[in-house]
Image: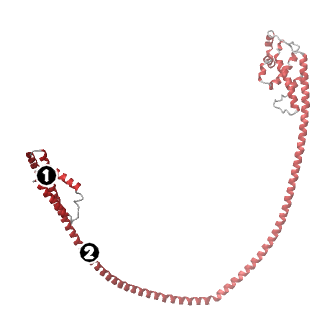
Amino acid sequence: MSSSEEKSASPVLPKDSDRGSSVSSDLQDEYEELLRYAVVTPKFEPSGLRQSDHMEVHQIPAVSASVKESAPMNMEGLCPIRSEETSSPGSSSCQRDLQGTYVTDMSLSDDRVTHIESILDLWSGSLKTNVLTELRKWKLHFIEHHTLEMRQEREKHAADMRQLTNQMENLKELLHTYEISLGRKDEVIANLTNAIEKQKDRIELMKKFAKWRLQHFLGKQKAREELYANKLADRLYKLGLLKKAWAIWRSRFNAKEKERMEKAVQSSVESVHAALSNEYEAKLQTVNSALEEARSEIIELQNQRQDYEDAMKKAFMRGVCALNLEAMSMFQSKDFKLDQVRSQLQPGPSVRSSVFRQQQEQVNSEGRNQLHPGPLNRPSMFHQQQQEQVNGEGQLG
């Protein structure tokens, strides 16, 4: 009983396990076969079984409990009575009431139970062998992997040691080189110190010699400098006097020259001004005389134009009157014509103005080019208009 419970409580493998391993494939096949039997058993009603088979019946719910963990949830609907029976021990009274109503169709045989037990034994044995085989494989694999990692680490350690050894050799050589260079630097520093001491002694000697030389030649140098300064001062004083005298003479000469030039320019300007004034006065007189002549001619021409316009007005008035009389003589009687002539000879101011306006428009439209001839042709045109006026008066009489 305990062995069967241990077998039923074995771990459930997932469906997506590795199909390549022998352990997984065998376990999957046995698990599927066991699942077929476990799914069929809940359909039997446990109330119809004998009391002696009660312990055997409890093995199947123990197996189905492990199956329910990985099987679909709809398996619980197939065996609701069995789940209640295993979950709550206080439901025995309810089971006694149900035993009278439900009747089982078939009973669980002993050969089926033994068959399941043999399958579980076989499954547990194969599981054990497969698990041990897999564990041995893993152990060998871990040992090989460990040896490989150890070998790699040793090689890496050896390479690091070689690299560090090379670095130490290089650093030793570099240290030896630095020691040599430091020795040379010490020698150079000693040589430079000796040279600086010698240079310092030489500078001290040069200072002493320069001081003695200055003290020895200072008196002569000062005397020479004073003599040269006195000569230079006398020379500059004389040069300043010469510059002042030259400036005074130059200013006086420039003043006299300026006065002479001003007089000459003034005399020439006065002569030119007199000549220009005389010339422009003569031109002005001639222009004034020409202007007076032009004004007199303009006045004469304006008078002639006024006389000509008056004569033209009279002639046009007479011509119009003659034309009116001739027209009236053709359509009316003699008396009516005489009355009309009298009325036309003495028109009112409005009639006169209208007749004058018509005559003026006719003159402006027909004789525009003849009213502006040259001054020589105007008397002849005036005589011609007078002749036409006389002819018109003769026709009117």
Q: Position of residue 13 (x, y in %)?
A: 83, 29
Disc 2 to disc 1, C-alpha distance: 58 Å
Quarter of the figure with residue 15: top right
With 12 as the anchor, is 244 left or right in this view?
A: left
Dot 2, how many residues are within 10 Å of its Cα: few (below 14), some (14-19), or many (20+)? Answer: few
On screen, residue 211 above or below 378: below
With 102 as the anchor, is 308 left or right in this view?
A: left
Residue lying at 59% horizontally and 88% vertically, measured from the top left: 222
Q: Secondary structure at mark 2?
A: helix
Front residue (pair 284, 234): 284
Mark identifier at residue 322 = 1
- In which quadrant of the rendered image does the C terminus lie? bottom left
Quarter of the figure with residue 212: bottom right
Dot 1, how many residues are within 10 Å of its Cα: few (below 14), some (14-19), or many (20+)? Answer: many
Q: Is residue 341 visible?
A: yes
Quarter of the figure with residue 19: top right
On screen, residue 303 above or below 73: below
Q: Position of residue 36 (x, y in %)?
A: 84, 22
Q: Nearer the viewer, mark 2 or mark 1?
A: 1
Front residue (pair 77, 85): 77
On screen, residue 152 above or below 312: above
Q: Is residue 306 visible?
A: no
The residue carrying mark 2 is 283
Callout 1 amino acid: Ala
Q: Position of residue 69 (x, y in %)?
A: 80, 25
Callout 2 amino acid: Lys
Q: Secondary structure at mark 1?
A: helix
Residue lying at 21% horizontally and 53% vertically, measured from the top left: 362
- In which quadrant of the rendered image does the N terminus lie? top right
Residue lying at 43% horizontally and 86% vertically, measured from the top left: 247
